[in-house]
Amino acid sequence: MGHDPIVSHAVRWRRHMLFQVLGEAGTHELLGHAEVVDAPAGTTVVSQGAPAEHFYLVLDGRMRLQVGDDCAGPSTLDVLGPGELIGQGAAAGGQPYAMSAESLEDSRLLRLDAATFRRMLEERFELTAFVLATISRRLCGLMRHLTALKMKTGGQRVADYLLGLTDAAEGPAEVRLPYDKRIIAETLGMRPETFSRALGKLRGLGVCRAGTARIRLADVGRLRDYCHLEAAEGRDARDA
């Protein structure tokens, strides 16, 4: 991983909530122990179980969060993009990283010193509140993810994912798959071939490929109705 001057990135990201909470003096202190690092695609930036000596702000690119053990291979929990933090909870608590982070594409991150951050946490209640809020949002996201894995069919998970890629509330839309279908399938708790089959089953609802990484949705409203109907039917079946 190579290094890059911080100043231009500090100006670019000065409106990030972390630096807003820190204020000018706090930002200057934290950045005094920081560096910008390049992470080519496939680079493991954070390793599950390793001491949290740093945490990271994603500047450019995409990073995937993974968990795994000796018996099962790594499983992708989430994909993070610019502006998102990695490892702040572990860094704040002085705990090992709870998951790994690997670059999906050539990425750039701001590496921040955990020891400096913990010292600042002892002096600033508002910074502690910020960390707790970011951890809470991440946990809520993981809970929604686990709920979807347990309560939604494969077709519904794929449909929900596609709907999340568009701002359209109704009518036609075209979306671009942001990364390889293998990674998307992992985040949805399925194998790549299962993802492809589930996508194929949505053709009856007007979902079709429009290119290598593009998907056309003929009727966004109809697809939303399908997801809600399946969710209700799934709950009824379990309650019976």
Image (cartoon, rainbow, N blue to C red):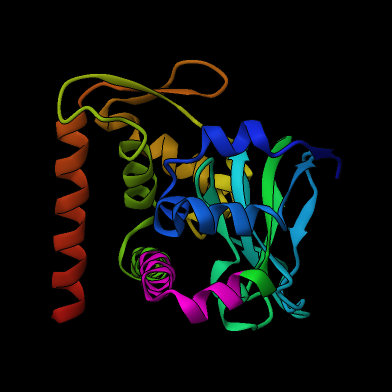
The residue most toward the top is 211
Q: Position of residue 96 (x, y in %)?
A: 69, 80
Q: Nearer the viewer, residue 77 or 73?
A: 77
Residue at image position (36%, 48%) is: 155
Q: Image quadrant for the N terminus?
A: top right
Q: Nearer the viewer, residue 232 or 18?
A: 18
Residue at image position (22%, 37%) is: 223
User: Magenta includes 160?
Assistant: no
Question: With respect to residue 147, does 13 lie above or below?
Answer: above
Residue at image position (66%, 35%) is: 7
Question: With respect to residue 40, does 238 lie above or below?
Answer: below
Q: Nearer the viewer, residue 118 or 176?
A: 118
User: Magenta includes 129?
Assistant: yes
What segment is highlighted magenta in the picture?
117-137
Question: With respect to residue 103, does 61 lie above or below?
Answer: above
Q: Image quadrant for the C terminus?
A: bottom left
Q: Position of residue 75 (x, y in %)?
A: 63, 64
